């Protein structure tokens, strides 16, 4: 019997194993998972709801959500994209719903729905799931692979899929089998900032800001959340993904330029401030903010930073203070002191060099019979279900190839 082995019991590993077993029911398909339970990241994604994919069916648009790997994924997505993911789960009784920002979740709002679906589908397809089975080493032997477990057990595989996520073991094994590695560094993280302007503003959100890494052209637009350690939210997470390399090179210490009022041209901003000064001369600056989208607490904090007295009326707003206020509103500079964590997604930038993988089949161009799927590859997407989609896609294509070729 042909033996197909998948190392890694995550999203990509399960998808690959299920598709391989369905494509070739006569093959023996085994998942080797080091942990006590599989699909750990699926469980915690989306705050325990599991952000399965994203409502984006245009491949040319979809690839733009991947700071690394988008070009390679273009062809892969033409074979299996979010629409196919939705159908895959619906065929197995799991309906997905779309939220306003395009993120898609199971209608139950419970990640266990996805975990159970994957586990049941694997069982039904005849996949042998082996938990508490960490792999010690993998060796290529002519037409097969010899997998040695830490339990001093050996398993032979005709086809091998490495779907180990960001585990160092997966990277090391890929290198042992002849692959080069793009050095892995964190992606998708929050910024640690200790700044008087943000102090005591825990939980304050601004729906649309423009954030830029000082000294670079990297910038993003979107919602921002002020936290007790600094800043988070979609705009920050996207910027961390696109800036993963440069931030790592700078040891996560860079200036962050924040435009709190992205929708306003500077001249329009000046016009509104002067108009407010003219129309409401007796009102206190602290008590009246002319910009609805700017939270009052943030407005007051910026004024305090500029040493504006709480009793100062709009009439006494000087030209110098006006210019400094405009700068704070649209070009405020904050120092990033380090990276925080984004608990819902742990994503790595870097991995197996994509030039060494055939994206039609996910098979290695260097080691025949070896396949890759998921985050072990040098692919990472921004937050919103894109990292899971690349896992489903690459896992599906690898499984299909492993099953069909045999």
Image (tube, rainbow, N blue to C red):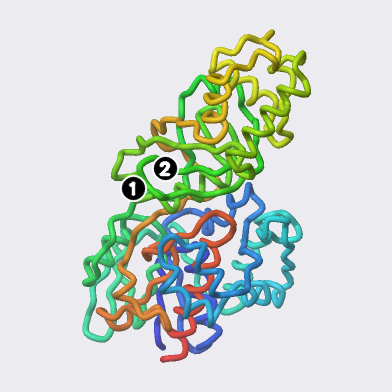
Q: Earlier in the sequence, mark 2 or mark 1?
A: 2
User: Residue at the location (21% across, 72% down)?
Assistant: 178
Q: Is residue 134 left or right of residue 388?
A: left
Residue 229 on image: x %, y % = 50, 29
Q: Nearer the viewer, residue 160 or 233?
A: 233
Q: From the viewer's perspective, is residue 211 above or below residue 170? A: above
The answer to the question of whether label 2 and label 1 lie on touching residues, with beta carbons closer than 8 A, is: yes
Circle 2 or circle 1, nearest the eye? 2
User: Residue at the location (40% across, 62% down)?
Assistant: 68
How crowded pointer 2 is (Cα within 10 Å; few <14, some 14-19, many 20+) is rated as: many
User: Residue at the location (37% across, 46% down)?
Assistant: 216
Q: From the viewer's perspective, is residue 257 above or below residue 377? A: above
Q: Nearer the viewer, residue 68 or 89?
A: 68
Q: Is residue 149 left or right of residue 242?
A: left
User: Which quarter of the rendered picture does the N terminus lie within?
Assistant: bottom left
Look at the numbered disc 1 and give the secondary structure of its residue: helix
Q: From the viewer's perspective, is residue 239 above or below residue 122? A: above
Quickly name the residue at label 1: 246
User: Residue at the location (36% across, 38% down)?
Assistant: 252
Quarter-of-image position of residue 197: top right
Mark carried by residue 213: 2
Residue 152 on image: x %, y % = 29, 62
Mark carried by residue 254: none
Residue 23 on image: x %, y % = 53, 87
User: Which quarter of the rendered picture does the C terminus lie within?
Assistant: bottom left
Look at the numbered disc 2 and give the secondary structure of its residue: strand
Q: Nearer the viewer, residue 31 or 356?
A: 356
Using the numbered discs, state the Cα–Cα distance from disc 2 to disc 1 in whole angstroms.
Answer: 9 Å
Residue 338 on image: x %, y % = 39, 34
């Amino acid at each position: 019997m042909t033996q197909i082995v998948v190392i890694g019991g995550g999203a990509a590993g399960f998808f690959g194993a299920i598709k391989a077993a369905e494509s070739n029911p006569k093959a023996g398909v085994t998942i080797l998972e080091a942990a006590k339970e599989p699909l750990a990241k699926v469980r915690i994604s989306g705050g325990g709801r599991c952000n399965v994919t994203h409502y984006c069916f245009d491949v040319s648009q979809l690839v733009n959500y991947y700071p690394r790997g988008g070009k390679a994924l273009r062809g892969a997505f033409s074979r299996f994209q979010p629409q196919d993911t939705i159908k895959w789960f619906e065929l197995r009784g799991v309906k997905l719903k779309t939220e306003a920002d395009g993120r898609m979740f199971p209608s139950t709002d419970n990640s266990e729905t996805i975990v159970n679906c994957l586990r049941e589908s694997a069982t039904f397809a005849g996949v042998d799931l082996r938990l508490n089975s960490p792999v010690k080493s993998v060796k290529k032997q002519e037409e097969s692979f010899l997998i040695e477990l830490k339990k001093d057990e050996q398993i032979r595989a005709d086809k091998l899929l490495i779907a180990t996520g960001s585990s160092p073991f997966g990277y090391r094994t890929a290198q042992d089998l002849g692959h080069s590695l793009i050095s892995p560094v964190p992606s998708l993280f929050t910024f640690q900032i200790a700044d008087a302007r943000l102090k005591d503003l825990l939980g304050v959100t601004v729906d649309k800001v423009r954030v830029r890494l000082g000294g670079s052209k990297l910038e993003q637009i979107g919602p921002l959340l002020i936290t007790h350690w600094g800043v988070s939210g979609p705009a920050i997470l996207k910027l961390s993904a696109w800036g993963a390399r440069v931030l790592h090179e700078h040891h996560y210490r860079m200036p962050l330029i924040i435009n709190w009022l992205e929708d306003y041209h500077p001249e329009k901003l000046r016009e509104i401030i002067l108009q407010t000064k003219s129309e409401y001369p007796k009102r206190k600056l602290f008590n009246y903010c002319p910009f609805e989208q700017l939270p009052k607490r943030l407005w007051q904090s910026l004024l305090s930073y500029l040493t504006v007295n709480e009793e100062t009326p709009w009439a006494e707003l000087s030209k110098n203070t006006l210019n400094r206020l405009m700068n704070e509103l649209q070009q405020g500079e904050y120092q990033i002191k380090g990276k925080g964590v984004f608990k819902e997604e742990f994503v790595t930038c870097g991995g197996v060099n994509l030039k060494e993988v055939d994206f039609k089949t996910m098979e290695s161009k260097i080691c025949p019979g070896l396949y890759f799927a998921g985050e072990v590859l040098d692919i990472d997407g921004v937050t919103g279900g894109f990292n899971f989609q690349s896992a489903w896609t690459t896992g599906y294509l690898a499984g299909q190839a492993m099953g069909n070729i045999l």
